[in-house]
Image: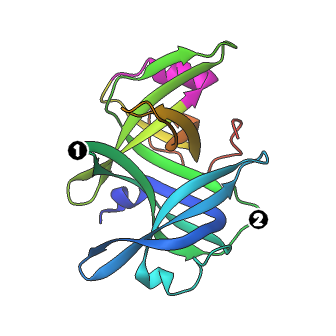
Amino acid sequence: MKYEQMNNNRVFLSGTVEGEPVFSHETFGEGFYEVVLLVPRLSSNMDRVPVTVSEKLLASGSFETGKFVSIRGQFRSYNKLENGKSKLMLTVFVREICEFNEDMNPNVIEITGFICKEPTYRTTPFNREICDCLIAVNRAYNKSDYLPCIAWGRNAKFVSELAVGTKIAIVGRIQSREYQKKTDDGEVISKIAYEVSINKVQLDSNIQDLAENDENA
């Protein structure tokens, strides 16, 4: 993998393993498993972040239920067919287990990519500015990850004025958000969405330091 592709998508997480790993798929004879990390915010809330871990890393015992683990990896997307419809799925692909550092933010993502859909700008009833955007991040073998992002305040206004195709660098955190969805038969179910909450954004890729504490945590 090229150096650029290794560094345009970097994630650091520290959290507690929720539940047993569940088999996901096999690639070139190696099994991969899905597990959820409960990652603390600055507030008392938690983000439930899905991660994908190989059976080799799983053998370390670090992903047993209730254990606290720190990992580095990449935030990735893939399409999954559900009820005949394609759904964008998001997960953190674990590259390595690392030592816990209490001085580091437990939830940091750094990505560099291209705006691939016109940003959606809006304000809340309390006049808080918000902007949603979708970022395409290049990966090896001519693949790309499509990552939904959300900006707030002055960052929202800045992102809202960027054109499709603009290359930007983002530092933020991966957040989970529960919402209600009405099914075709009228049933209301709870679902979880995942997105990058933007803390810093700029037009070049010279962001070197990990994010400061997210003001939206």
Residue linked to disc 2: 102
**Most foreground residue, 157 or 167:** 157
Which residue corresponds to the image point at 58% horizontal and 40% vertical from the top-left? 178
Q: Position of residue 195 (x, y in %)?
A: 50, 41
Q: Is residue 64 above or below residue 88?
A: below
Q: Is residue 118 left or right of residue 38?
A: left
| Mark 2 neighbour density, 10 Å: few (under 14) some (14–19) many (20 or more) | few
Q: Amino acid at mark 1?
A: Gly
Q: Amino acid at mark 2?
A: Glu
The colour scheme of the drawn protein is rainbow
The residue tagged with tag 2: helix, strand or loop? loop
**Most foreground residue, 202 or 143:** 143
**Residue lying at the far right of the rendered structure:** 44
State the predominant SS element of the stretch in magenta. Answer: helix
| Boundaries of the magenta span | 151-163
Disc on the earlier residue, 1 or 2: 1
Q: Position of residue 205 (x, y in %)?
A: 45, 43
The residue tagged with tag 1: helix, strand or loop? loop
Residue 131's disc is none
Q: Is residue 165 left or right of residue 203?
A: left
> Where is the N terminus found, in terms of image quarters?
bottom left
Residue linked to disc 1: 84
